Every structure is written in C-alpha cells, then in structure tokens.
Amino acid sequence: MQLRAVYAEELGKLMERDSKIVLLDADLGRASGTLGLRERFPDRIYDCGVAEQNMASIGAGLASYGFKPWIETFAPFATRRICDQIAISICYPGLNVKILGTDPGIAAELNGATHMTMEDVGVVRSIPGIVIFEPVDEVQLRAAMPALDAYEGPVYIRMARAEQPAVFGEGYEFDLFRADTLRKGTDLTICVSGILTRDALDAAEELAAAGISCELINVHTVKPIDRETVAASARRTGAVLTVENHNVVGGLHAAVLEALARERVPVFAVGVEDRFGEVGKLPYLKPALGLTKEHIVEVAREAVRSKVEN
C-alpha cells in the first residue's frame, strides 16, 4: 500500500476520534493522498493553495487556539520554503503543529533537482524544539500515527509517497524516541533512515555471508536521536556506517557524529555527497548518487578495515 494512502487512512481515523484535528494542504490533496478526506471532513480541511508560508502561519494560528493542525506539501516546500514560519511561528512558541513533507530526496524522481530535498533534515534539525520522524514502511507508519498525534509539539514528518518494501512485521511496537534494532551484530553498526532501510538490510545479509557481522539500527527519529542505542552499539562494534537519502551534511550522518562525539569510533557515510539531485527514476538515481546496496557493502568493508588499520 502506498505510504500516502496509509497516512490518509490513519489520519482519517484520528480525525474521527478528535474534532480538534484539522488538515491544511497547499493544493496537493491528491498528491498527498488526502483528497478523499475532504468529503468526510469538509469543515476541517483547508486548501491553502500554492502559498505554503501562509499555510504554515494559518496552522500556527489554529494551534494557538487549541486546534491540532496537520499541514502537508512536498518536502522542499514543507522545509526550505517555510523555514522562517517553522522557526518563529511554530517552534518559538512551541505550538502543536505536524508538518508532512512528501517525497524527500531521490523519492521526488522525475520532479528533479528543485524538488529533491537533500537538505531538509539539516534545515529543520537546526531549529530548536522540533522532532523529525521518517517512516520506513506501512507497518511503522501505521504504528507511528497515534504516537505523532499524542506528542504535544511540532513534528516534521519526512515521508515517501510510494509503497515501500516491508521491513517490520506483526507485533511491532513503536516508540517515537527509541530507534529500532533490526539485527544484532559485532563488527559494524549501520544506522539507516527512510527508504534506504531495505537496501541496508540486504547489504547486511550480503556482508554476513562474507563473515562481517553488522548491527543494523533504523533511526526513524533523527531529532532527538536515540543516543543511548546508537552509542551502545558503536561501543560494541567499534565502527559505524550511516545510510540516508539525504546530504551527508546536516542529516543522519551529522546527528550520529554528534551523538558519538565522546566515543572513539570511526564513522563512515553513505549518502548524497553535498550535491543537488537530478531528473530520473530510482533505478537511475540510486547508482548516480551512490545510494545502492553495492555501495553500502563497499563502504561497510572500508569501515571494518579501518578498525584493523587503527
């Protein structure tokens, strides 16, 4: 199931239970998957047009009167375009606004470089008081929606719209502030977020077949990062690799480096190497930007070798 459809379904359930939840979109209800909610909640959904800064300000105003607004648009317009509104109108007063940015990074595909937010996490992470969450698959997103609603404060949700390979199964228990350890290992810690999680899992399996044991951690909440889980794993394995659909500057890699500042372990990165994106489909974009399973394996081997060399 497409993640945007899951999001819309779960948001609809929340809106049925809580009349204070309102939804604002920037003429992208169809793109975000929430167009059908307009018929069910005609007096609680507002199309603000292609005016994202105004949308964010309206959301802040509604939150100041006790409503629980969710605002949604493509990731570049949910972060870069409304950065000042996020900082001053939403985060400075600590308002309860949920911000959905869809198709971050290479998930933007044919929309090209202008829509490929390689820096959205870095932009938002520097603003005080905001939580940043990125779902991996349908199961995790469904489990996360009630927790996101229950959290009193601003949250940026970085979500691909398309269906994603399954990572989590039945019985999964979600904790917004606790990273998920997907497999145990002894030679290398891999911290991964978002749509590259399945690639990292496949890479870990290939490395295991070659005798390299990887501990794989899905860091679904990049801010605040679960320092305890990441640092404990790093101490056990002695080396860390971060994997993300984002610039290596300012995103998961930066957050992990900050979390491990007092740990004496090497930290390597697979991510976008400080460049803009381009037009293309995922089979082209992944190798073009170094976001493949093969590249994860290559850098993981390098990280493990660095322990011996040091």
Image (cartoon, grey):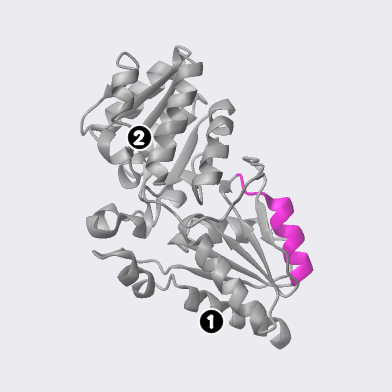
Report x, y in % for residue 299.
55, 78
Decide: is 279 above or below 138.
below
In the rendered image, residue 146, in percent from the top left (x then y), is placed at 56, 30
Circle 1: residue type: Glu
From the image, tell me which residue sits under label 2. 72
Q: Which residue is mark 1?
A: 298
Span of residues in magenta: 224-237
Does the segment drawn in magenta span residue 30?
A: no
Q: Is residue 133 visible?
A: no
Residue pictured at 67% horizontal, 42% vertical = 173
Disc with the residue nearer the chain's start (2 vs 1): 2
Residue drawn at (29%, 23%) of the image: 38
**Residue 39 in the figure: left or right of residue 182:** left
Label 1: which secondary element: helix
- Nearer the observer, 125 or 233: 233
In-image side of 36 versus 301 (left or right): left
